[in-house]
Image (cartoon, coloured by chain):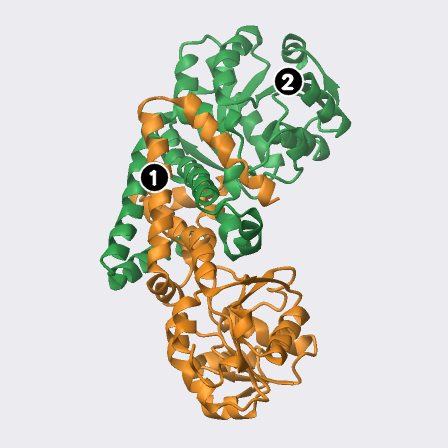
Chain colours: A orange, B green
Amino acid sequence: MTVTIIGIGLIGGSLGITLKENGFATRVIGVDASEENLHKATRRRLIDEEMSLAEGVAVADVIVLATPVDVMRKLLPEILDRISDKQTVIDVGSTKEQLLDEVVNHPNRKRYVACHPMAGTEFSGPEAALPRLFENKVCVIVDAEDSADNALEVARRLFRSAGMNFSRLDRKAHDLHCAYVSHISHIASFALALTVLEKERDEQRIFDLASSGFSSTVRLAKSSADMWIPIFRQNRDHVLDVLDEHIEQLSKFRTQLIKRDFDGFYERIERANEISKILK
Amino acid sequence: MTVTIIGIGLIGGSLGITLKENGFATRVIGVDASEENLHKATRRRLIDEEMSLAEGVAVADVIVLATPVDVMRKLLPEILDRISDKQTVIDVGSTKEQLLDEVVNHPNRKRYVACHPMAGTEFSGPEAALPRLFENKVCVIVDAEDSADNALEVARRLFRSAGMNFSRLDRKAHDLHCAYVSHISHIASFALALTVLEKERDEQRIFDLASSGFSSTVRLAKSSADMWIPIFRQNRDHVLDVLDEHIEQLSKFRTQLIKRDFDGFYERIERANEISKILK
């Protein structure tokens, strides 16, 4: 199969190298707004060839859209305009409602499968690509009933070849659950980085003391603004809802410290510990 | 050297196995309030022998106090009462001001070295002990000028044998910096776990979506209340100070979302990204 990947960053680049290595793709074509990114991807052998969007879409069996989510809203309808019913389009974006509303009435909607492979790191760009990024992770297929069966089958084979398992959600539920589990973690981590940078002016001190857990909690604060601002923009209402809850939870700890209610604090830590039943 | 470790949990147990394996200790004696913990530690070969506190202190060249910090305040003066000037006492606690105030006028103060090896995991108990936990981490020596030179030398050799580097702070600065870098990370993580458990009632959903960063940010939320409540109690004022800043940083993100000020949000993410200059 010829796979064209549009947006050769962490996810697009990782998919390129993965699909080539496991034999799903006989030919991986890269398309990117940045020539520098494309050349980097070629040098790192994440892709076989560089093409323009029009060329890349024309020759592909499968087109994977892996740009930031604001760019997806613009490109997805244009790509669907260009394809035949032998081609399949997949996106890998972190928000779905606005994107899917964009193409709900498109005549080629059935050739498109909305996917969210739940995998990533705090790094971005083709230099961050990893061949085993997707292994044993979950790919959420969104509004699957709006895709043709053979398009769904292509998407499933693609992500299964990368070692993924599957889950299904409709687009509203997807965005809600991602705000609740994924997007809030990023905001919490950005805020923690800002807190520590604000209070602790001594960088050597941060470095020395960071092994006590800070580095893991703050890891996501290295994430790219170019990727995350479009996500927060598109998922603003759900993110606000869970952010309110998070500030409320922190405020309760604050009140308990002020009142020296350490028994109440203890109980809430024990409740927080329950997360280890879900995440081993 | 005979090393007696009081409190065979994650840190005490890891020190036991490390010091035995690297040859610093010829004999590791374990003391613990829980007989079950002690037996586990023996079965896992973290310690060579089990003793009572009085016996363990009597036979040791070096005594390492590795209990929760509230228990340390009680035990440290009792241990200093019992030792000769050929013995060295070390603690590994996460807060120092109240502990050091407790023994400031003790006639054997100079035999004691206050240490904080900045290493750990979210797990606790002897089953969590790891032989290479301390490698390439920083050990903070607190109020070093109050310890005898030969006691300091024993402490340094002990932690150097475990692969640690050193830093020095006075007790007030230690507690402040630990609140700013370490303790706040734990509260942020506990609060994030509670947020997600509150909003996301579907446990399978949490599991499916967690690979997108949540699991790393929430890792510390598995930490033990028995260890952390005494730390928060002893370091309450500094923790409150940095917690206020953290709630403020989150509230700014909230305001920016409400106003749809995504340019401002973008700038603050870029500022948060600066943490990657400090923590690679």
Which label belongs to residue B89?
none
Name the residue located 69 percent from the left edge and 75 percent from the top edge. Answer: A22
The residue identified by callout 2 is B32
The chain letter under disc 1 is A
Could you say which is closer to the camera, residue B165 or residue A121? A121
Instruction: From the top left corner, tell me how far across and down residue A7 is, in percent.
Output: 47, 77
Give the chain of mark 2.
B
Q: Which mark is residue A248?
A: 1
Coordinates of residue B235 in the picture (x, y in percent): 38, 26
Among the 4 quarters of the image, the one containing residue A154: bottom right
> What's under tag 2, amino acid-wise?
Asp
Q: CA distance from mark 2 to mark 1?
A: 38 Å
B163 relative to B170 in the view: left or right: right
Q: Which quadrant would residue B164 be assigned to in this image?
A: top right
Residue at image position (49%, 22%) is B69
On the rendered structure, is B33 left or right of B90?
right
